[in-house]
Amino acid sequence: MNAALPNYISGSVIQARLNDARNGIGARDSLGRYIAKPGAGTYLLTTPLVIYANTHLDVTGVRIVSRFPTSGVKHTMLINYVPSGATGYTGAGNIAITGGSWDPVWDFAQRGVLGSAPAMNVLTLTHCSDVVIDAATIWNVKWWHAVEFNGVRRGTVKNSNLKGWIADPNNGLWHGEAVQLDLPTSINTWSGASDSTPCRDILISGTLCDTSGSQPGWGQLTGSHTFDAAHPHVGVRIEGNTVRNARWDAIATANAQSVHIANNVVENCVGGVYVKSVPNAPLQTVEIIGNQVNGINGRDALAVRADPAGGPISDVLISGNVVDCAKVNYYGAVSFRQGHVADCAV
């Protein structure tokens, strides 16, 4: 396109505010976190922002774009600080990120070199507890994720807009989770130890997942494409979201127990709500309640799939969903809550 670029402000200005918060400088929010608040403008990142413990990054009204090199830096616009070798949930936590218009490829597109934009995440939180992402708008992520919770306890994404995704031509559309629930294994550890710390007590609510003006929709709002059978995610709530034009299953979980998927709206997606186990990992307690699913094209509108290789799913509650029963399926060793008759049960 080669359109005129704005008068960028260096991303180092935001990092300076984050460093002030790390050093206990400035005002605090109601939970005691130091507030890092840069002034209005369009900021250009060339390296990731690093957020520290007890910090509230408030970028309401701020636009943040990136011009990362293809190698030499971690490909995420923001990551929390995690010491080398940190295990469990011991990295920097008690973090809030409020607002912001985050766009990892816009600068490349404006300069007419969109193909040179590296694949990357936008917000990556790992090995930590107590993270809230509120009212963020994230645009046109290439290949990876808008938000990755990688070994996070008590993580929330709420009231946000996740719009547009550039698919990886070498991976299936199931790889395109806007919010990826992950765990640090030998192949996907961002910082700290590769100890397979799972996610626990996750909430995704009030969020819109859809197309952007220039790119099609995500693969799905949320899900997981890596797993460790011995370390399931626990306590995943997906409530009151709207998912449109997803190119795979709109809402999914894999190897997660104590799952509550309620009051979401799914429209014009390839698939709807899909919960599955993995080999050698029995799961229990899945509740899919009060969702509206319509316009499904090609996959199940609602499905629970127990892996045939030792992955039964028990205590399943499916109730009050507005869904085409011809597109509802329960696969394998799925057992329903005692006394409950599931929607569309055969």
Image: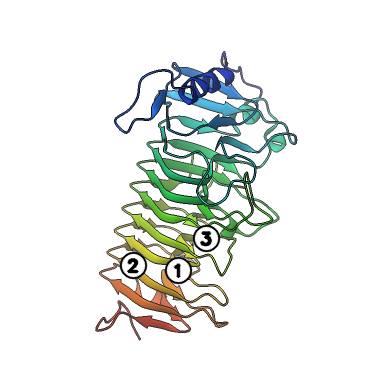
Kindly state the secondary structure of the residue where label 2 is placed.
strand
Density class for disc 3 (Cα within 10 Å; few <14, some 14-19, many ≥20) is many
> Are discs 1 and 2 less than 8 Å apart at CB?
yes
> Are discs 2 and 3 less than 8 Å apart at CB?
no
| Residue name at image x 56 percent, y 31 percent | 50
**Which residue has dot 3 on it?**
248
How far separated are the C-alphas under marks 2 and 3?
Answer: 18 Å
User: In the image, is 155 to the left or to the right of 239?
Assistant: right
Q: Nearer the viewer, mark 3 or mark 1?
A: 1
89 or 61: nearer the eye? 89
| Residue name at image x 66 percent, y 57 percent | 171
**Please, what is the three-letter code of the amino acid marked with disc 2?**
Ile
| Residue name at image x 39 percent, y 46 percent | 156
**Which residue has dot 1 on it?**
275
**Which residue has dot 2 on it?**
288
Quadrant housing the N terminus: top right
| x and y percentages locating residue 101 in the rendered image | 46, 30
Kindly state the secondary structure of the residue where label 3 is placed.
loop
User: In the image, is 324 to the left or to the right of 140?
Assistant: left
Quadrant housing the C terminus: bottom left
**Please, what is the three-letter code of the amino acid marked with disc 3?**
Trp
